Amino acid sequence: MKIAILTRNPRGYSVRRFKQAAKERGHTAQSLDPLKFALHVESDHPAMSYKGKAVGTYHAVIPRVGASIGLYGTAVVRQFEQMGVYTLNPSHAISTARDKLRSLQIFSRHTIGMPPSAFVHEKADVLPAIKKVGGAPVIIKLLEGSQGIGVILADQERTAAAIIETLQSTKQHVLVQKFVSESKGKDIRAFVVGGKVVAAMRRRAEGQEFRSNVHRGGSTEAVELDDTYAATAVRAAHILGLRVAGVDMLEGEDGPQVMEVNASPGLEGIEKATGVDIAGKIIDLIEERVQYPPVDIEQRLTIKAGYGVVELRVSQKSKLANKTIETSGLRERGVLVLDVERGGNLHPAPDAAFKMLLGDKLLCFGKLITLKELMPSRKVTRKKKKVQSSAR
């Protein structure tokens, strides 16, 4: 198997470990600079050249695309996808994970712990936003920051407001988050590979530094995550569509608080802290997925076919609560339940005897016209126009 590693740092620890793990398994891994590619977009023939020469055959791609080349690097990953090459993380998931605000917006639709956050544009909204997340102290983050760069702790509301206004004046986009005091100077990095946590470490800041990033001199130690933390990490990666991710969580009083999900997590700190061969586990995942590639159901369906995939919530109106899949009549109507999400847990391919409960989310495949009938109707309220009479 021939693997391409997209990176601008070919001598970095992670790249060296990927090459070593691939070689040990009888594969070849080559590092390629994403900015050296030229993309050729033609009808029915997506192609690329690298340093002026046609790109050879690759079986898989490991994207190590940093924020500095985000747009072009992600486009290169997307082009490999269009050429039918397996990419470790999909291009759309990389783009989503890099955008801190977008990631939090997506998480807000799911039952997942995260610190209250705010994003504002107008100066008049800054102080109300700080109060809304719980008041000072607050964390101020640049949306494009990484490795702890662009992260500021403000102890007072006025100070926070001044910092935000200054950053906004330089056209920087700023995120405001509640400061989780009980986790000051430490966090958890969980490494997710293929839907499970393969290693985890606790990072601690040095001295008065509140940022625990290893790049800022923080120390690390291996930890065994309990089920709640492990499930949160896996769920966060799954929600963003990442097959491999570094999920950073704070240890809050109410449980794990997801701070960030990294689509290109470094291997050095966590491999040295835990002794786990993470590079090898990632290559093993690539072997498995290249041999049995995942199928994108949505792309396989067409509008003409009249079929689709939708998510149905079991409510009183749906009349599915406390019924099994067999007695619900779904199968008779040509609706296949692909999985059921309940309380943060996923039940894939439920059998006929599976009982559905209020609040369950069903991922269903079937005729769109039938699925539409099962969807709860939304009432649209129209404002009544005021009729003004004039005396003549």
Image (cartoon, rainbow, N blue to C red):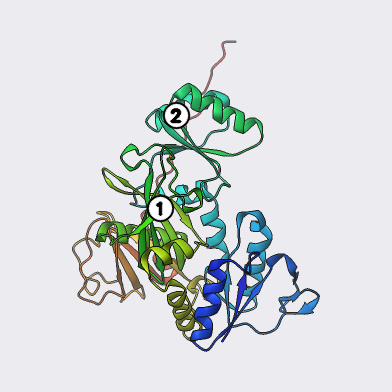
Q: Between residues 30 and 341, which one lies in front from this camera angle?
A: 30
Residue 218 appears in the picture as rendered: yes
Give coordinates of residue 291: x percent, y percent: 48, 86
Q: Which quadrant of the view contains residue 1? A: bottom right
Q: Between residues 288 and 68, which one lies in front from this camera angle?
A: 68
Residue 241 appears in the picture as rendered: no
**Amino acid residing under circle 2:** Ile
The residue positioned 58% from the left and 28% from the top of the image is: 165
- The quarter in which the C terminus is drawn is top right
Q: CA distance from mark 1 to mark 2?
A: 31 Å
Q: Which residue is mark 2?
A: 130
Give coordinates of residue 297: x percent, y percent: 48, 74
Give coordinates of residue 105: x percent, y percent: 46, 47
Q: Which quadrant of the view contains residue 231? A: bottom left
Sequence-first tag of 1 and 2: 2
Q: Which residue is mark 1?
A: 219
User: Does 23 sit above or below residue 50?
Assistant: below
